[in-house]
Image (spheres, rainbow, N blue to C red):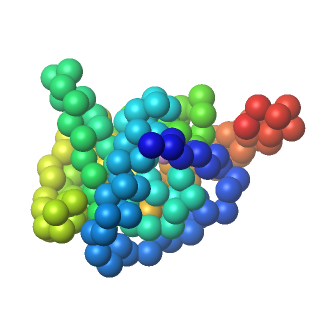
Amino acid sequence: MPKLNICKYGDQILRKKTELVAEITEEIKELVSDMFETMYAAPGVGLAAPQVGISLRICVIDVKLDGKSNPLAMINPEIIEGENKILAEEGCLSFPGMYESVKRFEKVTAEFTDLKGKRVKVNGSGFLAKAIQHEIDHLDGKLFIDYLPDFKRKAAEKEIKRRKKAGSW
Ligand code: CO
């Protein structure tokens, strides 16, 4: 199976709100499988469809729990509950090598359609909660640098510009 190309910050697709998935077809299942493969190869713990150039409401996450893989494929996900905001560092495959502290819920409940077409819920805390919120944001065209205070976001953008010039973005 071919690995997909990951779009970096600056690509307009990352800012587009995605379309809902109408039906879990074989193509959707194949896309999810390719997204997992691309995410593991990166390596990363989460990947959203816009990051591979596809504007659909799909994301994949695998945050290891007790050292065990815990793959989560979320179709049309929504956060339905969150509690207690905390500041924690995170990165993004569309921002290689950049890590920033972002304030997010410590615990969340999300609802999504699984690959069998069933609407299910997932509760996440800690790292998993962070990944769920980060990936669902991607589906709304929102990126982690949007949460930074102005001076930090400007510094990050400047660094990206510098790297683009140097051909390393
Ligand atoms: Co990301």
Residue for point 21% across, 52% down: 108
Quadrant of residue 125 in the image?
top left
Q: Residue furthest top?
A: 67
Left or right of 140: which side holds 96? Answer: right
- Residue at point 37%, 42% (across, down): 36
Residue 39 x/y as whole percent:
43, 38
Residue ranking furthest to the right: 165
Look at the image and tell me whether residue 169 can be seen. yes
Residue 9, compared with residue 121, is above or below; it is above
Image position of 130 with respect to 96: above or below:
below
Q: Position of residue 97 (x, y in %)?
A: 60, 29
Using residue 23 as the reference point, say whether residue 6 is left or right of it. Answer: right
- Residue 85 can be seen in this image: no
Give the camera-side residue of 100 and 9.
9
Foreground residue, 39 or 8? 39
Q: Quadrant of the N terminus?
A: top left
Q: Residue at x 46, y 31 (%)?
A: 41
Q: Residue at x 36, y 63 (%)?
A: 28
Assign the C terminus to one quadrant of the image: top right
Where does the image place residue 73, in percent across and percent down from the top left? 27, 52
Quarter of the view holding residue 106: top left
In the rendered view, does 17 fall on the left or right side of 111?
A: right
